[in-house]
Amino acid sequence: MTENRPEDVRAAVAQYVTALHRAYLAQADTFAPAVRGAMPLLAGGPPVTVAAVGVRNLHLLATREGLGPLRGQEVEVDGSLDGLGWTLRFYDPVVVPALGTLDETAGPAYDGVKTALGISTVVYHVVAQPGSGLTPHHAGHVGSGLASGHSAAARDFETIRSRVRGREHLVDELAGAAHAGLPRAQALLAKEIAPHNAGVAAAAESLDPDSIRKALLASVGGRSDWRPPS
């Protein structure tokens, strides 16, 4: 069986990323303008770079951190859709030797890949299975799911912000930490916003961003049927 040429693999990954972003934009178009504007991939800021990292799994990390000029065998491809632009860059153990030390037999090495690239903040980090999993259809599901999650987070943060008078700046920092993919910062900020809530404290221990946000939202009464205390 003939192996796929590197340029064919790169083309397939580029198509996958484009399909993911197309689905993200299509889902975002169903939301109100302010919600769209708060979604991490559509919010203003430095340009988006998507790092395609090939180890045992294929990692796709979107970040607004600069990755510097191309070096050695690094390759990049520019992409754009409806006002969203990005640069796709490819990495493997030949380009970044530290990737060759990662063991993914038990599952994707999310933190290890970020560390190898020196990336601390991400807009998204997804894993695609090479081969049959690298299809536009699969990318569409991933992109729609990302957009739904990002929009829910934007609405949750706005609700929380409206109910914690005097601590709005902490919620803004929390939203920024969530957009940047910094779970420890989110945990610390959530506990500062609701220091006496057991549910928030438990969620913070888990370092799971969704659990932290949902616990904090619950601590201020949830989204519906809430009235400020008299």
Image (cartoon, helix red, strand yellow):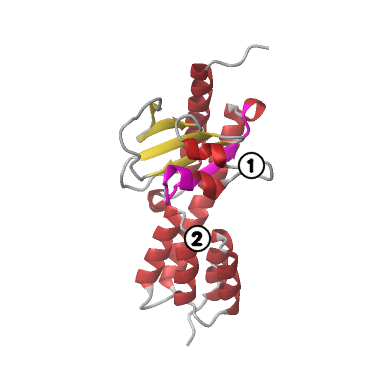
In the image: residue 230, left or right of residue 138: left
In the picture as drawn, the residue positioned furthest to the top comes out as 2
Q: Secondary structure at mark 2?
A: helix
Q: Residues within 10 Å of mark 1 (few under 14, many from 20)?
A: few
Q: Amino acid at mark 1?
A: Glu
Q: Where residue 199 sits: x, y (%)?
A: 60, 75
Residue 102 in percent (x, y) is at: 57, 42
Q: Which residue is mark 1?
A: 104
Judged left or right of residue 169, residue 29 is right
Mark 2 or 1: the one toward you: 1
Q: Is residue 12 above or below residue 30?
A: above
Q: Residues within 10 Å of mark 2 (few under 14, many from 20)?
A: some
Point out the residue furthest to the bottom here: 230
Given residues 129 and 156, the one toward you in this image is 129
Image quadrant in which the N terminus is located: top right
- Residue at figure coordinates x 55%, y 69% from the top left: 204
Magenta extent:
114-130
| Percent of width and height locating residue 37 | 37, 49
Q: Is residue 59 visible?
A: no
Which mark is first along the chain, 1 or 2?
1
